[in-house]
Amino acid sequence: MPVSPGQYITPAAVNVPFASGVASVDTIANTTVTVDVLFPAGRFTAAPNVVPSAWSGAPHQVLQVTVNNITKDGCRLYVYRTTSLAGMGVFWMAHQEMG
């Protein structure tokens, strides 16, 4: 699909399965904690690419956010933070490669 400068392309426009959201996790100082994410039912036919990102006003306290155990149905996010915080947000987005 040709794209013009400044043109915005949505996943639906190119028929790419896509999902995103924010997971809430209660962190414990200097400890890795996890949170499971479920993708919308039937969205993916194979394990998608998943990109997690910390949603924090104190990024120097979030040392790592990673993802593992990715399936077509969901994934597990891992968060390591130097301080405890209830309800820290972790933004994630997932897309399935087509082709």
Image (tube, rainbow, N blue to C red):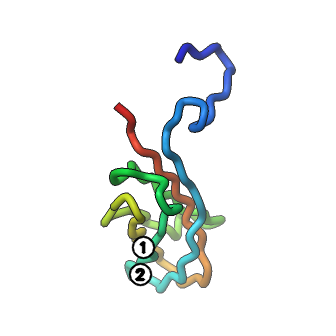
Residue at screen point 39% across, 70% down: 76
| Distance of label 1 from label 2 (alpha carbons) | 7 Å
Residue 69 or residue 33, whichever sits in front: 69
Quarter in which the C terminus is drawn: top left
The crowd level at tag 1 (other Cα within 10 Å; few <14, some 14-19, many 20+) is many
Residue occupying the far front of the picture: 42
Q: Nearer the viewer, residue 76 or 43?
A: 43
Residue shown at 50% from the left, 81% from the top = 27
Give how far across and how far down residue 9 sits, in percent. Answer: 62, 29
Q: Pinpoint residue 86: horizontal percent, then vertical percent.
A: 60, 84
Task: Give the number of the disc on residue 30.
Answer: 2
Task: Please give the residue where the numbered disc 1 appears in the rendered image.
Answer: 80
Q: Amino acid at mark 1?
A: Tyr
Does dot 2 land on a helix, a strand or a loop?
Answer: loop
Q: Indicate whether 37 appears above or below 12.
A: below
Residue 35 higher or lower than 11, as above or below: below
Give the residue type that dot 2 points to.
Answer: Asn
- Helix, strand or loop at label 1? It is strand
Q: Is residue 89 left or right of residue 99?
A: right
Residue 78 occupies quadrant: bottom left
For marks 1 and 2, the one nearer the N-term is 2
Reply above or below: 15 against 59.
Answer: above
Determine contact: label 1, label 2, CB under 8 Å: yes
